[in-house]
Amino acid sequence: MPSAAPMIVTLDGPAGVGKSTLASRLAGELGIAFLDTGAMFRAAAFTLGDGAWDWTQGILQQKLGDFEFTLRGSGKDTELLLNGSPMSADIRTEQVGRWASQLAVVPSVRAYMKMAQIFLGQVTPLVAEGRDMGTVVFPGAAHKFFLDADPEERARRRCGQLTAQGKPADFDAILAAIRERDDLDRNRSIAPLRPAEGAVVVDTTHLNEDQVLAQVLAAVRA
Ligand code: DC
């Protein structure tokens, strides 16, 4: 008899809504790995560089053929590896986020990422977070969530994180970058950001991290 497919929980939502933190904590509670699919797009954008979204589909396909993503560990200790190495902290800048968003509209890039993500979900139970996890990549997931929050609140949170790390934080610039990425991610023709059919929508604008985790965990365990 074939064994059951691994359990998948999907978390989708816009930039800065807190998906990565929630995915890591939820995965810890469930004792499984989490998959930060934004990091996959960021790693591709960082490795291929500025303007890669203008390359031909053929060249992009060929370059992406050299990428292999794997997962190690679980909960907050989950590590996403690219060709056997952990992700560089350099993928986390606003600039690389914007490049990732531009690269993410390219059909061959989306097709490659979807295939790589489905493969990971076939071998490991996952909390998968991104923009199109519930709509496109794992439409049959056991549990689907869509997190949202006002852009101003997301910008405030991002400023708080940067300040806590001793880095400069310009609220207006961060808010403008969040709005720009929302626009790119929600209005693209392939896999636009939107709640999946059957997803539980959680507006986190007035909730703290613990409250969001409690709501999502209760829904998974219900
Ligand atoms: O979640 P993030 O900010 O790290 O994602 C960076 C960009 O990658 C995001 O603006 C759009 C793209 N992305 C995507 O198109 N689909 C995903 N599943 C995850 C990220």
Image: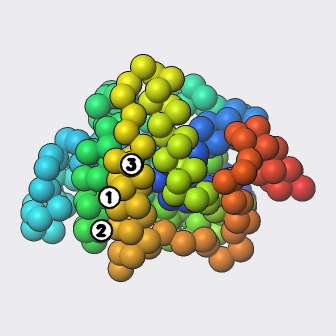
Q: Amino acid at mark 3?
A: Asp
Between the C-alphas of marks 1 and 2, the distance is 7 Å
> Can you tell me whether the CB of the residue at mark 2 lies under 8 Å from the nearest atom of ligand 1?
yes
Q: Earlier in the sequence, mark 3 or mark 1?
A: 1
The residue carrying mark 1 has its beta carbon less than 8 Å from ligand 1: yes
What percent of the width, then of the height, locates residue 205? 67, 54
> Can you give x and y, in whole percent of width and height, for residue 24 in the image?
61, 36
Q: Residue at x 35, y 67 (%)?
A: 184
What kind of element bears circle 1? helix
Q: Is residue 12 left or right of residue 40?
A: right
Residue beneath disc 2:
105
Residue 70, picture quadrant: top left
Query: Are the residues tagged 3 and 1 within 8 Å (C-beta)?
Result: no
Residue found at the far right of this picture: 222
Q: Is residue 112 above or below residue 158?
A: below
Across and down, in percent, residue 19 comes to: 58, 47
**How many numbered marks does the figure carry?**
3
Determine whether, in the image, residue 10 is placed left or right of residue 119.
right
Depth check: give the residue in front, 169 or 183: 169
* Mark 3 burial class by Cα count in 10 Å: few <14, some 14-19, many 20+: few
Tag 1: residue type? Answer: Ser
Work out which quarter of the rendered image holds the N terminus and state it. Answer: bottom right
Q: Residue furthest top?
A: 166
The residue that disc 3 covers is 172
Can you give x and y, in whole percent of width and height, for residue 69 in the image? 37, 42
Dot 3 falls on a residue whose secondary structure is helix
* Badge 3 or badge 2: first in the primary sequence: 2
Horizontal side of 192 relative to 18 (left or right) equals left
Residue 101 - label: 1
